[in-house]
Image (cartoon, grey):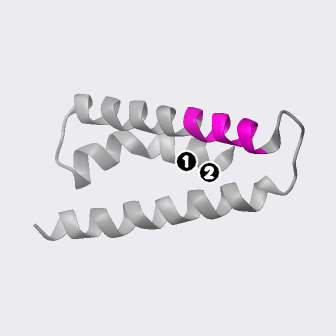
Amino acid sequence: MVFGAVFLSQFPSFAKDVLHGNSNVASLLLVVFSIGIATGSLLCEVLSRRHVEIGLVPLGAIGMSVFALDLYFASSWIAEI
């Protein structure tokens, strides 16, 4: 929960400082983030067959870490341009 809150609080400054965008870019980032959360939740429901499944937690943590690293490397490439 804290992981997502950090991303949500940093999207406006990330859009302005790194992507050199306006509030529309920050809104787009929030929409894409929300769609990703919804898609991941639905995928967890399908994989767990509507039962609480603790084994999916590491899979979700790995997925969030991979996409956070992807965002880091993509934004460092954008900053060089």
CB atoms at circles 1 and 2 under 8 Å apart?
Answer: yes
- Label 2 is placed on what type of residue? Phe
Q: Residue at x 66, y 47 (%)?
A: 2
Q: Is residue 44 magenta?
A: yes
Specify the quadrant that holds the N terminus: top right
Q: Which residue position is annotated with label 1? A: 6
Residue 18 at x, y = what percent? Answer: 24, 55
Q: Is residue 37 magenta?
A: no
Judged from the image, the secondary structure of the residue bearing numbered disc 1 is helix
Q: Is residue 23 left or right of residue 60?
A: left
Q: Quadrant of residue 31?
A: top left
Residue in front for this viewpoint, 74 or 40: 40
Q: Which residues are magenta?
A: 38-47
Please say if 18 is above or below 44.
Answer: below
- Label 1 is placed on what type of residue? Val
Q: Which mark is residue 3?
A: 2
Residue in front for this viewpoint, 5 or 68: 68
Residue in front for this viewpoint, 48 or 13: 48
Judged from the image, the secondary structure of the residue bearing numbered disc 2 is helix
Q: Quadrant of residue 72?
A: bottom left
Q: Is residue 76 left or right of residue 51?
A: left
Q: Which mark is residue 45?
A: none
Please say if 37 is above or below 71.
Answer: above
Residue 45 at x, y = what percent? Answer: 74, 36
Q: Residue at x 87, y 52 (%)?
A: 54
From the image, give the main secondary structure of the stretch colored magenta: helix
Q: Residue at x 43, y 46 (%)?
A: 10
Specify the quadrant that holds the C terminus: bottom left
Please say if 4 is above or below 32.
Answer: below
Q: Residue at x 67, y 55 (%)?
A: 60
